[in-house]
Image: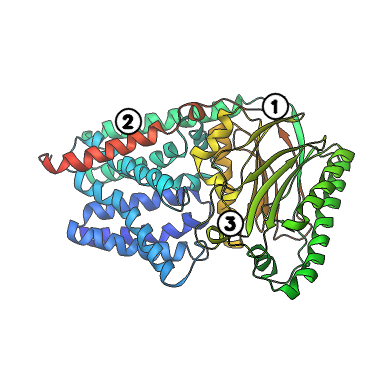
């Protein structure tokens, strides 16, 4: 009977996993992890962990379909890797739960979960993709934890709930043996929730603001796959001149759109990642036109550009060029974190430093798409006392919602407003507390332009100053549990 209940919990938890991988349903994460912890603790070790891994593999394979940018054998291998990483915290919890004092035992699972998330974010290709913290988008009081200890604090609280609830479930909720663990969790969670609500309520509304607009490319100028072929310089000699004519039309689209938004009152206009394609031979002439527009309209242009070096091994410069209202090029930044696979194979990589420049509208930090998924990289902007983060991105339909949500946490971590201009995704503006100011969906009808009044200036945060000490603490505690518990007697 116990094993049947555990197997039902295993299946139910695995069914919920794809829900929180793809859609923002915050409670699904809490329930799924609780059910999976219950299953692995109730089942014999030799049955529970292999069954868990199989359930995780099936759940990840379903949840990551069209999200991971690969297919075939590579997709199956990556799914197996993700499933193994997800299974490790459950395995350590299963080994340690019966050998440590009850309250300490409840901390093993969340510490191990955070340790795996954090270490993967530093040394594995997906960065912070897959963190359960992102599933809590919309729960603003809880999201404020990111300002203190980063997203790792959010992941810890969600996973700690699972181990604490399972402890109470297994021992009877009224038992005196569970009171200390329940009291500890409830107290911490209440303090976090109240503290987050107070932080939001105390946020000022009178900060100076900047009117910002984001543009997007025309939908009918290129045939499917044509922009990709230009970006990777896989076009024939005969195609180059006809495509140059299309690129000139694209340039006109963005320049005229920027002129329109400037005359409507925008002082900063942001173009999405790689949306302005230009041959290297034509780049200087285009930039002169952009400078002339910035001067004549007194506007700052933050241009997501793809400069194409024809007939070269690495043809793609993935750039963010910022021209200020005086016509001065203040930033020409190359993306520092290429996405593994296609992009990494054709892209010239930046130097790993976030540019932060002073303008008459404030200090502006720039980065591009995947750069924004590395918290330690983005933290450079706060440490350089930026007033706003400019983030051009290029998504696709299956990831547009997930990747959009991730940007809000970078705002909270660093106490900075963030402007996200998205090709094939969701353009958005967030304030320093992660509140959504404006949004535009490329896939919706219309021209995709977004405008927002963005409050400028940094709100200092502990996380920006002290970094990932909490995550490293979880790594240390998980390592201690792994090494020490085999030598401890059972409770």
Drawn side of residue 439 relative to residue 313, left or right: right
Q: Residues within 10 Å of mark 3 (few under 14, many from 20)?
A: many
Image quadrant for the N terminus? Answer: bottom left
Residue 284 x, y percent position in the rendering: 78, 50
Secondary structure at numbered mark 2? helix
- Residue pictured at 35% horizontal, 42% vertical: 115
The label nearer to you, 3 versus 1, is 3
Which disc is residue 205 wearing? 1
Please tell me whether residue 465 is drawn above or below residue 485 in the rendered image: above
Circles 3 and 1: CB atoms closer than 8 Å: no
Hey, which quadrant is residue 156 in on the image?
top left
Residue 383 x, y percent position in the rendering: 55, 28
Which disc is residue 124 wearing? none
Q: Earlier in the sequence, mark 3 or mark 1?
A: 1
| Residue toward you, 229 or 468 | 229
Residue 194 x, y percent position in the rendering: 49, 28
Secondary structure at numbered mark 3? loop
| Residue toward you, 76 or 442 | 76
The label nearer to you, 2 versus 1, is 1
Circles 2 and 3: CB atoms closer than 8 Å: no
Q: Earlier in the sequence, mark 2 or mark 1?
A: 2
Viewer can see residue 99? no
């Amino acid at each position: 009977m116990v094993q049947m209940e555990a197997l039902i919990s295993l299946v139910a938890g695995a069914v919920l996993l794809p829900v929180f991988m793809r859609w923002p349903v915050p409670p699904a994460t809490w329930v799924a992890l609780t059910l999976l912890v219950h299953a692995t603790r109730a089942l014999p070790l030799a049955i529970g962990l292999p069954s868990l891994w199989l359930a995780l593999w099936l759940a990840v394979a379903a949840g990551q379909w069209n999200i991971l940018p690969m297919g075939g054998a590579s997709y199956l291998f990556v799914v197996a890797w993700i499933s193994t990483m997800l299974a490790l915290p459950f395995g350590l919890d299963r080994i340690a739960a019966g050998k440590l004092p009850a309250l300490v035992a409840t901390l093993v699972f969340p510490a191990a979960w955070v340790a795996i998330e954090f270490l993967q974010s530093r040394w594995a290709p997906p960065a912070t993709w897959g963190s359960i913290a992102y599933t809590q988008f919309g729960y603003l009081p809880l999201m404020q934890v990111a300002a203190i200890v980063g997203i790792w604090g959010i992941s810890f609280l969600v996973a700690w709930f699972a181990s604490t609830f399972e402890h109470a479930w297994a021992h009877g909720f009224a038992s005196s043996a569970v009171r200390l663990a329940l009291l500890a969790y409830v107290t911490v969670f209440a303090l976090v929730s109240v503290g987050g609500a107070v932080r939001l309520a105390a946020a000022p509304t009178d900060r100076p603001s900047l009117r910002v607009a984001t543009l997007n490319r025309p939908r009918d100028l290129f045939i499917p796959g044509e922009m990709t072929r230009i970006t990777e310089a896989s076009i024939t000699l005969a195609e180059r001149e006809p495509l140059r004519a299309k690129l000139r039309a694209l340039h006109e689209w963005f320049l005229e759109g920027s002129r329109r938004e400037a005359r409507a009152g925008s002082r900063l206009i942001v173009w999405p990642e790689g949306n302005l394609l230009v041959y290297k031979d034509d780049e200087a002439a285009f930039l002169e036109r952009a400078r002339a527009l910035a001067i004549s309209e007194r506007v700052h242009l933050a241009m997501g550009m793809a400069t194409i070096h024809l007939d070269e091994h690495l043809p793609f410069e993935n750039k963010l060029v910022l021209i200020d209202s005086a016509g001065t090029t203040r930033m020409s930044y190359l993306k520092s974190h290429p996405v593994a696979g296609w992009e990494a194979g054709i892209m010239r990589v930046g130097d790993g430093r976030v540019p932060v420049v002073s303008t008459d509208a404030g200090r502006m930090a720039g980065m591009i798409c995947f750069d924004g998924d590395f918290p330690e990289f983005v933290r450079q902007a706060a440490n350089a006392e930026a007033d706003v983060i400019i983030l051009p991105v290029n998504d696709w339909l299956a990831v547009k919602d997930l990747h959009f949500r991730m940007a809000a946490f970078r705002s909270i971590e660093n106490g900075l407003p963030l402007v996200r201009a998205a090709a094939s995704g969701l353009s958005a503006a967030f304030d320093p507390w992660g509140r959504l100011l404006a949004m535009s969906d490329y896939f919706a009808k219309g021209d995709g332009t977004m405008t927002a009044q963005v409050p400028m200036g940094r709100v200092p945060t502990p996380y920006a100053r002290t970094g990932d000490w909490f995550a490293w603490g979880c790594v240390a505690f998980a390592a201690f549990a792994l090494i020490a518990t085999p030598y401890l007697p059972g409770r």
